[in-house]
Image (cartoon, rainbow, N blue to C red):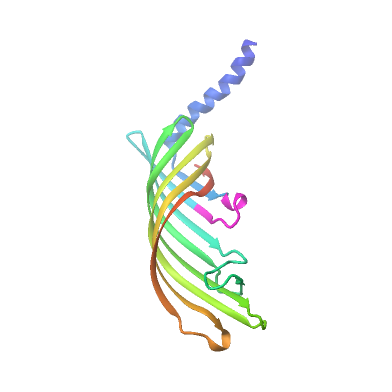
Amino acid sequence: MYFYIVSCILPTSILYAQLNSNLKNFRWEISTAITPILIKNSDYELVVRKYKTKNDRLSALRLRSTIHFVAKNTNLSTSDYINLAEGPLNAKITLGIGKEFYKKIDKLLIYTGPEIIGGYYSVKLYKLDPLNVPTHYFEEGFLIGANAVLGAKYIMLPNVTIGVESMLHYHFQNFSEDGLYIEANRKNRTRILTHRVELLPLSSINLSIIF
């Protein structure tokens, strides 16, 4: 019985000691969002982190890229019956760089930090009017903004974590649109400047490998 208890506890103790030791040796991390598997129409995301330990405090520089594909049967304010057409991209791409500051609680890593982002998107849509004439909608634009990030990771293995992230998001957007038009009678593009503040309680669920 004694040897059975020791054989159960000892590997866990060794793993926990290795975990604490590895925290100081964190160098790089590659993280990918598994949110699209769990939640429909979520962003695809890839994050690369460079860790740094100073005075036993862990921080990381992060580089994050996302791509969001426009879902079919997308509803716009201009119409309730718009579907995807063959467009140049039909997606939104963003790139962000930020800094994270960590607090360790047992096997849980909690982090906060700022992030600056930029992005581009291009969407082409169409609908069929009552006479089956295709009416198009085209929109493209650029955005720049910032995020206040709050996240948590659970260390499943010394080099594998699963985590969630939320953020307060702000961006300034410069985009142009053609509105609804028939190809033979295309309107001139309208350029629009706008901004947006958004709270994202669950912006991503991610799986990471640290090395």
Q: Nearer the viewer, residue 68 or 82?
A: 82
Q: Is residue 157 above or below residue 178?
A: above
Q: Look at 46% across and 45% down and name the residue there.
A: 28
Asked if residue 36 is among those painted magenta in the image, a careful observer would answer: yes
Identify the magenta region. Answer: 35-46
Asked if residue 112 is among those painted magenta in the image, a careful observer would answer: no
Q: Look at 58% across and 74% down and name the residue there.
A: 125
Q: Is residue 198 left or right of residue 206?
A: left
Q: Is residue 200 left or right of residue 39?
A: left
In percent of width and height, residue 56 lies at: 35, 33
In percent of width and height, residue 51 lies at: 41, 43
Q: Nearer the viewer, residue 177 or 140?
A: 177
Q: Is residue 141 left or right of residue 156?
A: left
Total marks shown come to: 0
In percent of width and height, residue 167 lies at: 43, 50
Outermost residue toward the top in this view: 2
Q: Is residue 34 above or below residue 72?
A: above
Q: Look at 42% across and 33% down and name the residue there.
A: 104
Residue 90's quadrant in the figure? bottom right
Q: Nearer the viewer, residue 81 or 53?
A: 81
In percent of width and height, residue 119 lies at: 44, 64
Q: Look at 65% across and 11% down and name the residue there.
A: 1
Outermost residue toward the bottom in this view: 184
